[in-house]
Amino acid sequence: MMAELHQTPTSLCCCRKSLPASGARCTGDSSRPSAGPGPGSPRCPLVDVASASNFRCFQLRHFHLDLRLNFAVKEMSGWLVLDLVPVQAGIHTLVLDSHPSLLIHSIDCKVPGSGQEEPVSLTYRVDPFTDYGSSLNISLPTTAVKPGRLIQITVRYTTTDGPAIWWLDSELTCGQTRPLVFTQGHSVCNRSFFPCFDTPAVKSTYTATVRVPDGVTVLMSASRSSYSKPDRVFQFSMEFPVPSYLVALVAGELQHVDVGPRSRVWAEPCLLSCAVKKLGGSVERWLGVAEELFGPYLWGRCDIVFLPPSFPIVAMENPCLTFIIASILESSEFLLIDVIHEIAHGWFGNAVTNATWEEMWLSEGLATYAQRRITTEAYGEAFTCLETVVRLDALHRQLRLLGDNNPVSKLQVKFEPGVNPSTLMNLFTYEKGFCFVSYLSQLSGDVHDFDRFLRDYISQFKFKSVVAQDLIDFFLGYFPELQDAAVAQREGEEEGGRGWGVGWVLPSIRCVCVCVCVDSECPPSSWSSGLEFERWLSGCGPPLYEPDLSAGGALIQPVQDLCVLWRRSDTPDLQTLTSFDLSAWSTFQIVLFLDRMLDHSPLPHDVMVSLSGSYSSLFDGLNAEVQIRWLQMVVRNSFYPDLPRVRAFLHKHTSRMYTVPLYEDLVAGVMKCVAVEIFYQTQRRLHPNLRRTLQQILFQTGSTPIQSERPGSVRCPPLPLPLILCAAATARCHGNRLHRDDGRHRSEGRQTCRREVDLRCHLTEAVIGRLVMW
């Protein structure tokens, strides 16, 4: 679980005192993110408590993977070669992040250019670290390790059923003809794919060789690729430095169609034409808008692969090759948002990366802001405001459940060693982060000036990992008048003897700012507290500022008016309802309507009868994003006449994003027996990891036998439902965080939260940001 370590940090830096680690204590800073120009206190050595590795002791120049995929036994075997340069003397141990699912066969070392012809075999041991990984401790030859001299470490290993690798039998694919495998590394899962420095603070280039059976196509998040058909060998090269979590692979029966000069769509043959039709030439258009705003696209290729419903999240921004769940193809508007969000990650998250998982908002908050700048330019301000209202509604819905003082609502969330960073993925990372970036944009005085700032920010820090203070120092250096104003504010208050507890208003911002610094000896970097940066990053609760969304009024007001009609004690008459033609509404308008009606569930039975009579047939013909919300209303109101629609939906949809919320609502109400019946009817078409999640929901255990499970199948370890800290002891959340999880991946963010006193909060992943990491 998450623990709050610092109530009010005095520095914007996310580092803290180093924890004891195996091997030498390193003071080198080759892996530290660079500081931007402008004021700032001295940086502490960066510490990532989610990594067991001693990454600060080495510079990782490059690594190479050579793998053979065996679908019959669901294994990847081969070797990893690390090109490392020690950054200081006295380093006797290399510590890598690993996982119990990795079977290490041997490790050896070579020193290129030393005249050494044969590699030296190394001793090693594997130690426990956390429930999501272990540490691989490798003893290095003292005569070979010298500061600045390259060494090559080769690790031969086999993977089994680790959390990063998802093997799908043919019946779990869309075509149901061939098996498929994909990896999902965010946030700390790739240590079960290959031993590594599994921290976003370390970036490097990589190459890979992958050997597969005949008829299998392999894709990786790489800038170059080639294929030797006689040998059935795929070669990949990523020429730009990336962190470990962005190394991704998918292999199966995949075909492609080019949809632009630098983008193509990949999918199973049965899905390909639909995917191409949905995207058309839009990808190049979106890339062009993004480049006008934020500068050149740095990655060359921008390909997209659609994966079966077993993909545990909505989308993942793997460089050059975005992974997206095929289920989202039903909804054009949500597909648009998800793809644009992943494109935005090409600048924010992939090119410039958060150095620790405690500051994921540096990736997701900036990417969400960039996504909305792109949609504003491409589709207008009204469309963007409507989508934003849907997300911010969900943010405040979550706050009402958790309470304003819950530490999970911080942007800089401190967590103790052993906490899985995936549990930190939540709406605040996206939407509160977005609001903070919008606040910076307002401070700059002009949105186009802020676009130029972001363009120069990318240019300054591209292919580096940063902390929040890097962004803020660069911002204050870019807009020095803001820092001057903050300094003048402080000096004026000190001369007047008023201290720092005075409220003041920035002319361009419609909110009152209350300074929080009470230490007269604060270093210059904390002068920015006059601009509320400390409260934004370290404070709990809602955003201190939200952007003006009135430009979406023409789309939003009809939704609100209809909600008011249905919330009255008497059901609205037919003549009044005819003025609201939902068949002409966009998906986001209907989603907003249903979300706000869900907020008021349970509803009177006669209201549900009227709602069903008015809309259920219409919703049957719309996409799954609309249907799941209506069906949640059906379940939460125990409206039995529409129960067959719930059954039909769960028989059709087998993805986590559309199953978990409905099962949780069924179990929370009086329909648990219905949920159990549907589960036993559909379990053969569910991925084993999803089956276990549903078992936990249905039976409050992960050990209940699954009927008719295929003998000899490889079983993944149980995946606990991540818990979100709640302010009240009576509140609990069951999250299916897979955006990136099941405790293992970037959570999707779909959550259905409920209170033991029957306080229930509608937090589906579609509503709370389609968390895409992601």
Image (spheres, rainbow, N blue to C red):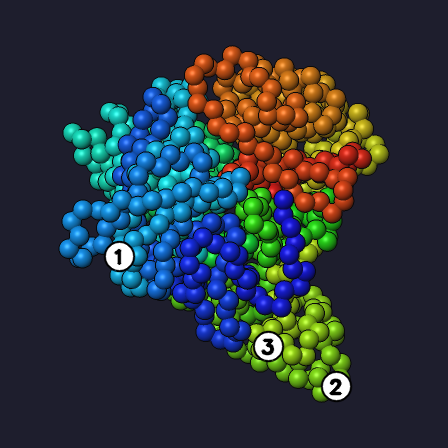
Label 2 sits on what residue type? Gly
Mark earlier in primary sequence (1, 3): 1
Q: Is residue 85 above or below residue 519?
A: above
- Cβ–Cβ under 8 Å for marks 2 and 3: no
Mark earlier in primary sequence (1, 2): 1
Instruction: Report x, y in % for residue 321.
Output: 36, 42
Local packing at callout 2 (Cα closer than 10 Å; few below 14, some 14-19, many 20+) is few
Q: Is residue 213 above or below residue 56?
A: above
Q: Residue at x 35, y 64 (%)?
A: 89
Instruction: Report x, y in % for residue 315.
Output: 47, 40
Label 3 sits on what residue type? Pro
Q: Nearer the viewer, residue 195 or 633?
A: 195
Residue position for label 2: 496
Local packing at callout 3 (Cα closer than 10 Å; few below 14, some 14-19, many 20+) is few
Residue depth check, mark 1 versus mark 3: number of the one nearer the observer: 1
Q: Is residue 754 above or below residue 384?
A: above
Residue 212 is left or right of residue 539, and the answer is: left
Residue 225 appears in the picture as rendered? yes
Residue 322 appears in the picture as rendered? no
Question: Circle 2 — which element?
Answer: loop
Q: Residue at x 65, y 48 (%)?
A: 395
**Furthest-top residue in this view:** 708
Residue position for label 3: 523
Q: Residue at x 22, y 54 (%)?
A: 111
Q: Residue at x 45, y 14 (%)?
A: 711
How many badges with numbers are in the image?
3
Q: Kindly report the distance in space between the C-alpha atoms of the residues bearing marks 1 and 3.
A: 44 Å
Label annotation for residue 144:
1
Label 1 sits on what residue type? Ala
Instruction: Report x, y in % for residue 525.
Output: 57, 74
